Amino acid sequence: MKNIKVLGSGCAKCTKTAELIQKLAAELGVEAAVVKETDAEVIMGYGVMRTPAVVVDELLVHSGSIPTQADITGWLQS
């Protein structure tokens, strides 16, 4: 199972990112626990300056925009 955190303030882009990850995981049949993290201290702990950001299995893989479907598919399948 993939543990995925979407880091952000809860803005529309952060929500859209989490929804897109959940949708693609379901389509690909990949088990993924998607958590939205809004705590500023936790977000800063990953060194994130721009949100939304995505952490997969405790590795920061993206920040600053909504990731592409191709990016998400790659994270889910790796």
Image (tube, rainbow, N blue to C red):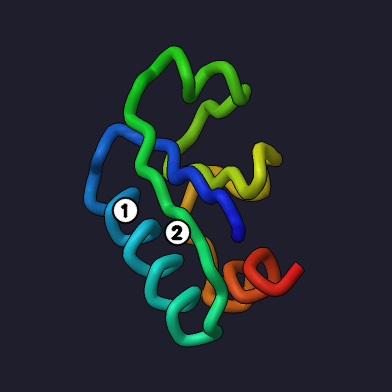
Q: Earlier in the sequence, mark 1 or mark 2?
A: 1
Residues packed near mark 1 inside 10 Å, few (<14), some (14 to 19) or many (20 plus):
some
Q: What percent of the width, then of the height, locates residue 17? A: 39, 59
Q: What percent of the width, then of the height, locates residue 62? A: 61, 49
Dot 2 falls on a residue whose secondary structure is loop
Residues packed near mark 2 inside 10 Å, few (<14), some (14 to 19) or many (20 plus):
some
Q: Is the residue 18 above or below the residue 5 in the image?
A: below
Q: Are marks 1 and 2 in contact (CB under 8 Å)?
A: yes
Residue at the spot 53% in from the left edge and 68% down from the top edge: 31
| Quadrant assignment, res 9 | top left
Q: What percent of the width, then of the height, locates residue 72? A: 58, 68
Identify which residue, 12 or 73, lies in the foreground: 73
Q: Is the residue 42 above or below the residue 48 in the image?
A: above
The C terminus lies in which quarter of the figure? Answer: bottom right
The residue where tag 2 is placed is: 66
Q: What percent of the width, then of the height, locates residue 52? A: 43, 44
Using residue 17 as the reference point, say whether residue 62 is left or right of it: right
**Image disc number at residue 13:** 1
